[in-house]
Image (cartoon, rainbow, N blue to C red):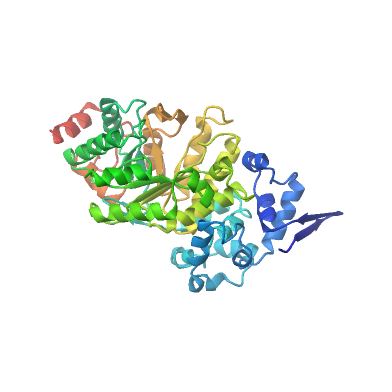
Amino acid sequence: MPTYACSLGSTRHVFADLKAVMACASPRRSGDELAGIAADSDERRVAARLVLADLPLSAFLDEPLISYESDEVTRLIVDGHDVAAFAPVRSMTVGQFREWLLSYAADEAALARLAPGLTPEMVAAVSKLMRNQDLMAVAKKCRVVTGFRTTLGLPGRLGARLQPNHPTDDPSGIAAAVIDGLLFGMGDAVIGINPASDSPAACIALIEMLDAVRRKFEIPTQSCVLTHVTNTLTCIERGAPVDLVFQSIAGTEGANAGFGVNLGILKEAQDAALSLKRGTVGDNVMYFETGQGSALSADAHHGVDQQTCEVRAYAVARAFRPMLVNTVVGFIGPEYLYDAKQITRAGLEDHCCGKLLGVPMGVDVCYTNHAEADQDDMDTLATLLATAGVNFLIGVPGADDIMLSYQSLSFHDILGLRHRLGLKPCPEFEAWLMRMGMLDDAGVLAPLATDGNAMRRLLAHGG
């Protein structure tokens, strides 16, 4: 393995391998410091970025950060690499690639053609040379469109997952949260419950309840109970009306094993969901969640920095043509992303890197109560992401998830973003809101969609 070096003034900085360059080039974050791989000074961080900027993109094909023999995610990345798609940027260094990405030549069509030729390590590397504005500018140019009963990712649209979690899976509490969210125009991305119980019987009851609500109100959306993929397979075998299959994933084989999954199980679940043929406008049936720090928390990061491990998870997602992917950016806690500055940066990185790889990225803009962050910080990140063209955001009643005990966005936060930025829900869902009489003559949902008439119209329609 080659070593890498850079001199700054009288100091010569030497990096043992490409993993060390990548880790030291990362913006400061608590997870990399916890792992003992972060740069120990800003000067060393700059030196690593200088080395990285002059490195050929092809170096990541020649020097895998995690060996091909020991990791099935690496094998997926290497075996699936599209050489022809990579050709336009093959001769570029990482620094030149950044300049090209920010140029007019890197438009929506060019980036879509390029995506299959990029590896996650290339994408993570170039993101380390970008400011936040760069990440937003590049992400805005990437368009990743998916469909099931609604079409997500279209220009001028901001989707929303309606998350009606309840600490005891109480059907009445969940139903109330669903109605509340629908009145704010939420749910076009998915109505998705994190179940308190992982028993197949309990999950089937929730799946059937959500499907009954969807059919009763004729809502063009998809539902999902975010249980383990093996539970969802059991639910499908028992005849449950499953729309999307959910699974948390990570960027290494070992971290995925910690989640109880591998690529074979994910393929089996995808095939099972496709066999149901429940989609109307598309057949993207998978829903993945990720988050920086998961590989480190599983002690399966192989000395690779947490952001690069995260981007490798998007290569896993890409292989299964998902409907939805979102990073739960601040959910794992301050041990990995210490404060609002680190959470904000990670959210913009994740969104941009996922989009560059051709993944339909959303973000759960969130934090835990022991992190150095508050709701004002989440307002800032949500606004930045919506400006950058994020496919969807997640909303919970009152921005407080009472089952998972963390803070996210509220329904009116996302509605407010749509109003301020001139964004709409997905077209099928917008047409449903119009049919339900919940939009005004200008096609705008009331800023506080709590008037009794809207409620009465919705309930009357459902009988």
The answer to whether residue 423 shows anywhere in this view is: no
Task: Give left or right: position of 245 versus 18.
Answer: left
Residue at figure coordinates x 49%, y 58% from the top left: 356
Q: Is residue 241 above or below residue 461?
A: below
Q: Nearer the viewer, residue 403 or 376?
A: 403
For the C terminus, the quadrant is top left
Q: Is residue 395 above or below residue 387?
A: above
User: Which residue is outermost to the right?
Assistant: 10
Task: Give left or right: position of 109 versus 93.
Answer: left
Q: Nearer the viewer, residue 241 or 425?
A: 241
User: Which residue is outermost to the left?
Assistant: 463
State which quadrant residue 246 falls in: top left
Task: Give left or right: position of 234 versus 403.
Answer: left
Residue at figure coordinates x 60%, y 59% from the top left: 67
Count of numbered badges drawn on the protein: 0
For the N terminus, the quadrant is bottom right
State which quadrant residue 209 falls in: top left
The answer to whether residue 27 shows anywhere in this view is: yes
Residue at figure coordinates x 60%, y 40% from the top left: 342
Residue 103: percent from left, percent from top? 55, 64
User: Which residue is outermost to the front?
Assistant: 69
Residue 104: percent from left, percent from top? 52, 65
Residue 316: percent from left, percent from top? 46, 55
Q: Is residue 232 above or below residue 9?
A: above
Residue 49: percent from left, percent from top? 69, 55
State which quadrant residue 7 falls in: bottom right
Q: Nearer the viewer, residue 275 or 146?
A: 275
